[in-house]
Structures are given as C-alpha cells and as structure tokens.
Image (cartoon, rainbow, N blue to C red):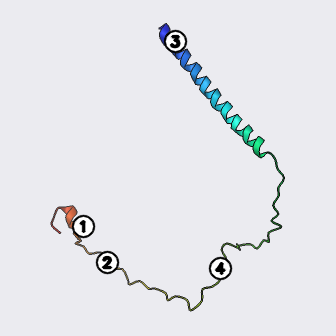
Amino acid sequence: MSGDAAKKRESAGWTWLVAAAISVGTLLVFLLSYALIGERPRTWQYGAPYYVPGESVYSIRAEPPGPPPAQVELPPAKASPAKSPAREALKGGRP
C-alpha cells in the first residue's frame, strides 16, 4: 500500500509542477509581448466615417451595362410515378 500512496503523491507533485510551469510560461509570453509592443499612442487617423443606415461602401456597386438578363421559368414538376425503379429495387423486384 505504501508504494501506491508514494506514487500518487509523486504524480500529484508532477501535476502541480506542470500546471505551474504552464502558468509561468503564459505570463512570461504576455510580459515579453507587452515589453516589445507596449502602450503606443494611436498613429492613424481615419476621420469621422459617415453614417447612412442600411448602406455600406462594400455593398454598393454600379449597375451592369446593358439590359437586365431574362428571367428563367422552370417547367412544371412532374408527379412521381407510382412504380419507380427505386421502389421496385426496395421491394426486391427487378427494375
């Protein structure tokens, strides 16, 4: 029994060591990035964008030249036949 308890304590110790190492590593990465980048003032000036409800500069486009394309009308759908090859195959008959 004492061997199992020692293994559990050793395993728990390694688990805490790995968790602490991951935490310290994460903090070091953030501190390094903060040291390299820091808090710099904003250097760009976009100005005040205009606001028009429902309008976007990315969705506005000029109408294409020429007449609009003809509308396509689909033929009416046929009613499915009572004896289709798929139904016959499911029933075990020959299509």
Closer to the chain start, of discs 1 and 4, is 4
Q: CA distance from mark 2 to mark 1?
A: 15 Å
Callout 1 amino acid: Ala
Label disc, if present, on residue 61 of the rendered structure: 4
Closer to the chain start, of discs 3 and 2, is 3
Label disc, if present, on residue 79 of the rendered structure: 2
Callout 2 amino acid: Ala
The x, y position of residue 25, in whole percent, is 66, 33
| Quadrant of the image occupied by residue 87 | bottom left
Q: Secondary structure at mark 4?
A: loop
Callout 4 amino acid: Arg
Q: Secondary structure at mark 3?
A: helix
Closer to the chain start, of discs 2 and 1, is 2
Task: Identify the residue position indicated by label 1 in the image.
Answer: 86
| Quadrant of the image occupied by residue 79 | bottom left
The x, y position of residue 57, in whole percent, is 70, 73
Image-based side of 56 in relation to 84, left or right: right
Closer mark to the observer between disc 1 and disc 4 = 4
Q: Is residue 73 above or below residue 27?
A: below
Closer mark to the observer between disc 2 and disc 4 = 4
